[in-house]
Image (cartoon, grey):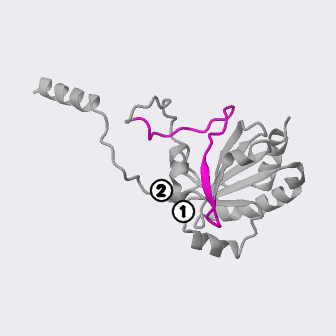
Amino acid sequence: MTACLIITALALACNPPVETDEEAPLPKSTGLAQPEQPAQPANLRRDTASLPVKVTPGEQLPTFTFLTMDEKERSIEEFIGKPLMVNFWGVNCPPCRAEFPEFVEFYKKNKAEGLEIVTLNVDSSLDKQRDFLKQQEMPWVLGTDQDGKLFRKWGYRGIPTTIFVDSGGVVIDVQIGGMSRAQLDSMKSRLFQE
C-alpha cells in the first residue's frame, strides 16, 4: 500500500501541468497583496513560458505594449530615457482612486524635469475608465492592461502597484499599495538620479 502511494506521488510530481488557454480571473484588490515568487527564467519550455516574471529593482524594465484610452497601441520603450512611473490601478479600487490627486500634484511639479507616468487599468472596460476620467484629472498617458494579463504575468496580485524606473530604463523600486505625497516626494531623488 505504501509503495503504491509513493509511486503515485512520484508519477504526479514528474508530469508537467496541463496547459489551458484560459487564465484565472484577476483577483479583487485588497491593497495588501505581495508579488508571487519569481519564476525561473523561461528557457522556452512550454510548461514554464507562462509563469510570472517578477519586475525587480536593479534590472531593466521588461518591454511591453499597451492600448491607450483612444485604442492605439503604444510601447513602453517610447518612455525610456525619462524618469518613469508605471502604475497598475483599477476603477473599483479605493486606494487607487485616493492616490491619484497625489499623483497629479507630483506630476505637475516634476513634468518640466521630464517625468512620465503611464497608468494601466487592470479591472474595467474602456467605457468605465472613460466615465471615471470625467471625475478625475489624469494628465499623463492612460492605458489599459487588457484583463490584467501583464499585471499577472509580472506576478502581482494587489492594486495599486507602482513601478519606478530611472531614465536608463532600470527599475529602482516597486511599491504595492496606495502612495501618499510624502512617499512620492521621497522617491524623487532616486527617480531623477543621473
- At 18% from the left and 30% from the top, the residue drawn is 8
- At 78% from the left and 64% from the top, the residue drawn is 139
Amino acid type, callout 1: Asp
Q: Nearer the viewer, residue 86 or 92?
A: 86
- At 30% from the left and 42% from the top, the residue drawn is 18
Q: Which mark is residue 70?
A: none
**Image location (x, y in percent) of residue 72:** 63, 61
The quadrant in which residue 107 appears is: bottom right
**Image location (x, y in percent) of residue 85:** 73, 49
Cβ atoms at labels 1 and 2 below 8 Å apart: yes
**Going by the image, does 55 lie left or right of 138?**
left
The residue indicated by pointer 1 is: 123
Amino acid type, callout 2: Leu
Could you tell me which quadrant the N terminus lies in? top left
Q: Earlier in the sequence, mark 1 or mark 2?
A: 2
Question: Residue lying furthest left in this view?
Answer: 1
Magenta region, main secondary structure? loop
Vertically, is 125 above or below 151? below
The residue indicated by pointer 2 is: 26
Q: Nearer the viewer, residue 30 or 108?
A: 108
**Image location (x, y in percent) of residue 138:** 74, 65
**Going by the image, does 175 lie left or right of 193?**
left
The quadrant in which residue 120 appears is: bottom right
Residue 55 within the segment the image draws in magenta: yes
Disc 1: CA contacts within 10 A as few (<14), some (14-19) or many (>=20): many
Could you tell me which quadrant the C terminus lies in? top right
Q: Nearer the viewer, residue 55 or 35?
A: 55
